[in-house]
Image: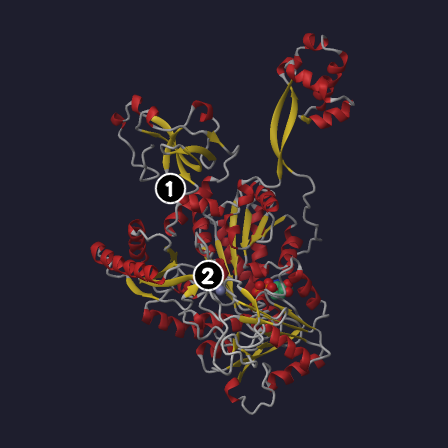
Amino acid sequence: MTDRQGHLFPEDIPAWELDAAASTRAAAVVLTEAPWGPYHYRIPDAFAEQLQVGMRVKVGLGKAHRDMVGYCVAIEVVPQAPDRLKPIEAVIDAQPICSLHLLKLVQWMSQYYLTPLGQVLEAVIPAGVRSQAGTRQRVLLVPSATASDSLLVDRLPTRQRQILQQLILAGQPLEGEVLRQLTGCSSAPIQRLREAGFIETRTERVFEAGRADQESVPLVAQPALTADQRLALVAIRDALDSSQHQTILLHGVTGSGKTEVYMQAIEHALTFRRQSIVLVPEISLTPQTRTRFQSRFGQVAVMHSHMSDGERHYQWRRISEGEARVVIGARSAVFAPVPHLGLIILDEEHENSFKQDTIPRYHARDVALHRAALEHVPLVLGSATPSMESFRRGLLGQYRVVTLPRRIHNRPLPNVTTIDLRTRKSDPHQGAISTPLFEAMRDTLREEGQIILLLNRRGFATSIQCPACGYVVSCPDCDLHLTHHHEGSKAVCHYCDYMIPTPPVCPKCKFDGIRYTGLGTQRLEMEVKRRFPQATVARMDSDTMRKPGSHERTLSEFRGGRIRILLGTQMIAKGLDFPNVLLVGVINADTALHFPDFRAAEKTFQLVTQVAGRTGRGDRPGRVLVQTFSPEHPAIAFACHHDYQGFMGQELAIREKFGYPPYGSLARIIVRGPELMSTESFAEQVGKQIGKLRSQLGLDQVRVLGPAAPPIARLRGNHRFHLLLLAEDPGQLHRLLTRLQSELKPPKEVLYVIDVDALDML
Ligand code: ADP
Ligand code: ZN
């Protein structure tokens, strides 16, 4: 058994203790599964030259010598006799799979997100890269040293001599197949030449043929910037020229030309041969965005979640060889292995999708910040509605704030009005569309304009209830109602995908008048089609957008004007730039407002502002109608007045009062298990342990809420409990969590996760 090494980089050992007999060159190795290590392994002479930090190795673990894969994270001399360490068995990679920069970044992540380093590495380096997907091993033939001895060559049979001369003439290693074709020979004489030592072989990995490179897009020249854009660009260029890290918060209203500023900043970074990474929410990775960057830069690597392992590996390789000048991708592109990073841009920085909801639960914005600092480059965060975290850092002077307060060409922001749903009782149409919204839609269609309708709930009806006995059809595994889907008449759980045919009669009392209540996008679509039979309507939600390419197709039909009304979930609220959209209707602005989440108001404000931003982007002004039961709620009222500052001012005061982020940090601990009793009692034990550590370590700043049942108290057959930890000083919180994690031993079947900087409260 090798010794456990507590620290990766131990304190320097005094020279007199480093007795030569008891010192060994060793690799510190973190394993890719538990126990994670790090452990030291001796480096046998055979690998001494080959092994580098960042490569994967094969090692044996424990007395049973279990085969394990690990990453070499350091090479150092340890004060131990060689025979006390197990050797590295094999080196897997020919090149480091993880650069030194990336290694530093993941070490920080491992510590900050309380996740073993090996687990972070496995999550951060794509599976396709680890398995070298899409490549094959190629055997190449090269002339050996013997082949330059003309006396020996002259003595070869004619056929063999010709083949060897052909290979020498080629001036480069050839595959056997190619050499056979060139000389018209069989494999026998080549084999004989190899046996006689005239030809040697060498293997290398190549990408399989048929990899489609990007279609080329005609390049487009850059427009002259507006005065506001120029100021923003100057701020970023100053940061680039300083070769120092700085974060710039680009707060620009919707349609103010942020993307153009990004592109010219990237161009500046290219003048000193540095690559840029642009992070966008997955939803914004539309062809429109890609084309825009491709038509400016040509060589762009796009990374999205629908790539095959082979494609991902290919892109990773292209990027690490410096071939892509710009990398655009969702969250995980923050790890793109660009060799000379110049700039990181994170667009729509307020989006929750930048936080990963599986281990490691990192936030791409924080990782980007850390990477930019490590590599001394600027980070640009852009948004029309910056998150409260970033807004406050701007106020504190930690970020430099630049604003684009106007739309391009001084186009006005749309006029936003609310429709109070409480006063609708007299409305003869009891559907989803109120009379004022109906009239606005009718007028817009008459004026040849296009319409976007937002409803943030998919399905037909959000609950299926028996009016006779009150029974509600629910998921057997989750604490949630099933949603009725009209297509195929099925009832679906939106969390675990449990699905049954929608019961025709009440499963409990057999009453045959079961009712579908609650409005989803399918029902809205039906209503729109019924009331506007002439207009072409398309629905965009995760049900209609399952097939690859459907997103693109629908958007391009909308762009071309063949679709007049586009309705859907938040998918349609963001990033789209269609000049002919003259009306945006929000069917129910309150869907997220009453969530048991302290960020509910912020999310609602952002959603209404963003969807409103989809109109008035052309020559004709746009308008927005927001249907709501709470028009006086600040999140809605401020959004209607385009008053970001006003909303932030009020909301910050509330956050401060309760000590919620951005005042201090937050972590959430979720405990789950199949059995209620053991799960609950472990959650209570966690609470007690936190209390004990608080007083033991003197961390009186840390506040604990819970354990309590979260809004979704049962999920996929598991009972759930959660605790929220808040602290003004993030250091205190981190110390407590680190200790807690080392001490907690949940019973079998009960699991817990620590979600640092949690966004999800359900
Ligand atoms: P944002 O990202 O802030 O929503 P965009 O960058 O998408 O804004 O810009 C909105 C529109 O204005 C786009 O169609 C873009 O091509 C155009 N645009 C941006 N900057 C300029 C400029 N300086 N001159 C003319 N048009 C511009
Ligand atoms: Zn379920």
Give the quadrant of ligand 1.
bottom right
On screen, residue 243 above or below 380 = above
Q: With 86 as the anchor, is 498 left or right in this view?
A: right
User: Which residue is disc 2 drawn over?
Assistant: 716
User: Which residue is disc 1 drawn over?
Assistant: 35
As shown in the figure, which amino acid type bears the numbered disc 1? Pro
* Residue sticking out furthest to the bottom: 426
On screen, residue 427 above or below 728 = below
* Of residues 260 and 657, the one drawn nearer to the viewer in this rendering: 657
**1 vs 2, front mark:** 2
Q: Place residue 280 in its image quadrant.
A: bottom right
The CB of the residue at mark 2 lies under 8 Å from ligand 2: yes
Q: Classify mark 1: helix, strand or loop.
A: loop
Q: Name the spot of residue 593 as percent of width and height, x first.
A: 46, 75
Quarter of the image with the N terminus in it: top left
On screen, residue 481 above or below 182 = below
Q: Name the spot of residue 377 as percent of width and height, x first.
A: 47, 49
On screen, residue 3 above or below 442 = above
* Of residues 225 and 489, the one drawn nearer to the viewer in this rendering: 489
The CB of the residue at mark 1 lies under 8 Å from ligand 2: no
- Mark 1 or mark 2: whose residue is earlier in sequence: 1
* Residue sticking out furthest to the front: 510
Q: How many marks?
A: 2
